[in-house]
Image (tube, rainbow, N blue to C red):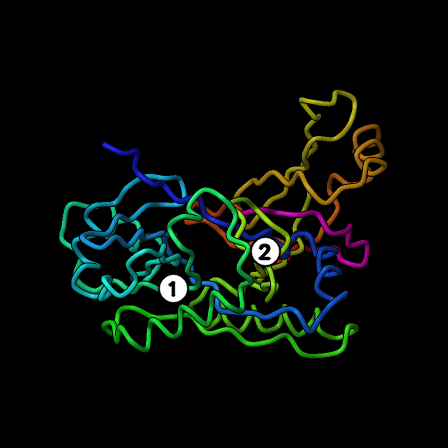
């Protein structure tokens, strides 16, 4: 028996908390596009002449999903290809429950954004993204899959270098407000590489709160400097460990009074059900404020 083909996905780099990476886009605006980022479950589907195999981004096979897609994808027309996308229910937690739970899958959307030949499951596909998209759209027109199978459309990035960054972040925020995760900016002539890449950049909506710093904690890996500050996030104590320069880490650890008790601006992705801040980043001390936002 031959070794099963387990595809390795191409992964985007997060631009949201690394805004300086926008320079790779600004250097050649004409070669970039963007598309909606679905907050779902990454699934790569290998389509063979007689069956399909579905794999998560970690290489785990999901046979339950295969039984569902056989009735919706018209998969035989995709034979020889790996279909790459995200499955989605009403939200990310419900999606995980639907895919992993014991109950049969009834209504699950598959948002497909890429397509590569199976021979490129583990080696880079040199075909440019714009050509892979054309093949995907052509096959979709021929296959006429069910309404639960959706080929994600892309739009080109337009604008002036000095304004396009704000436009992209505003667009990502609008997508979040509509129930999506944000957007992904992609280089039109990028190959499909099986790694995290700067040719795909995801942008999400950031939130900001002005919170009181209530403590400092020494770095475990670098003793003698600041590791994290602790902030009171509306009654929940949260650690904030990124966003500081080396000089700030030295200064705040050697003289905690410079920050403890002060109001600090913190950006973050979202609040967890337990009230914690997801991916918090220190922005600045708000010397102009005496009271926190909550």
Nearer to me, 102 or 263: 102
Q: Position of residue 259 (x, y in %)?
A: 77, 41
Instruction: First in sequence, mark 1 or 2: give its number.
Output: 1
Q: Which residues are magenta?
A: 278-290
Q: Is residue 34 left or right of residue 30?
A: left
Q: Is residue 214 left or right of residue 61?
A: right
Circle 2 SS class = loop
The label on residue 294 is: 2
Instruction: Judge whether residue 286 is colored magenta.
Output: yes
Residue sitting at x 57%, y 48% = 233
Total marks drawn? 2
Nearer to me, 174 or 273: 174
Residue 258 lies in quadrant: top right
Q: Position of residue 226 (x, y in %)?
A: 74, 30
Residue sitting at x 35%, y 52% = 43
Would you place residue 66 above or below residue 236 in this image?
below
Residue sitting at x 18%, y 59% = 70
Image quadrant where one finds the C terminus: bottom right
Residue wearing tag 1: 112
Q: Position of residue 103 (x, y in %)?
A: 14, 50
**Label 2 Cα crowd, 10 Å radius (few <14 / some 14-19 / many 20+):** few
Would you place residue 103 above or below residue 79 in this image?
above
**Label 1 Cα crowd, 10 Å radius (few <14 / some 14-19 / many 20+):** many
Image quadrant where one finds the N terminus: top left
Q: Is residue 245 left or right of residue 292?
A: right
Camera-nearest label, 1 or 2: 1
Residue 62 lies in quadrant: top left
Residue 49 lies in quadrant: bottom left
Residue sitting at x 70%, y 26% = 219
């Amino acid at each position: 028996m031959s070794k099963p083909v387990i595809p390795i996905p191409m992964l985007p780099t997060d631009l949201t908390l690394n805004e300086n990476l926008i320079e790779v886009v600004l250097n050649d605006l004409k070669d970039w596009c963007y598309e909606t980022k679905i907050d779902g479950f990454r699934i790569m589907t290998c389509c063979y002449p007689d069956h399909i195999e579905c794999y998560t981004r970690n290489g785990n096979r999901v046979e339950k999903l295969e039984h569902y897609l056989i009735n919706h994808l018209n998969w035989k027309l995709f034979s020889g290809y790996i279909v790459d996308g995200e499955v989605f229910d009403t939200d990310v937690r419900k999606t995980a429950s639907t895919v992993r739970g014991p109950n049969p899958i009834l209504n699950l959307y598959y948002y497909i954004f890429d397509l590569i030949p199976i021979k490129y499951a583990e080696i880079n596909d040199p075909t440019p993204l714009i050509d892979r998209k054309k093949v995907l759209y052509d096959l979709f027109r021929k296959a006429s899959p069910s309404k639960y199978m959706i080929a994600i459309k892309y739009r080109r990035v337009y604008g002036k270098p000095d304004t396009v960054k704000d436009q992209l972040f505003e667009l990502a925020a609008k997508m979040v407000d509509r129930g999506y995760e944000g957007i992904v900016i992609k280089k039109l002539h990028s190959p499909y590489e099986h790694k995290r890449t700067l040719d795909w950049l995801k942008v999400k909506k950031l939130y900001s709160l002005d919170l009181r710093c209530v403590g400092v904690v020494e770095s475990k890996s670098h003793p003698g400097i600041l590791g994290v500050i602790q902030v009171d996030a509306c009654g929940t104590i949260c650690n904030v460990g990124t966003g500081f320069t080396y000089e700030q880490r030295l200064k705040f650890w050697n003289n905690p009074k410079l920050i403890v008790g002060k109001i600090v601006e913190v950006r973050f992705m979202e609040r967890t059900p337990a009230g914690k801040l997801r991916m918090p980043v220190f922005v600045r001390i708000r010397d102009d404020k005496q009271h926190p936002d909550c």
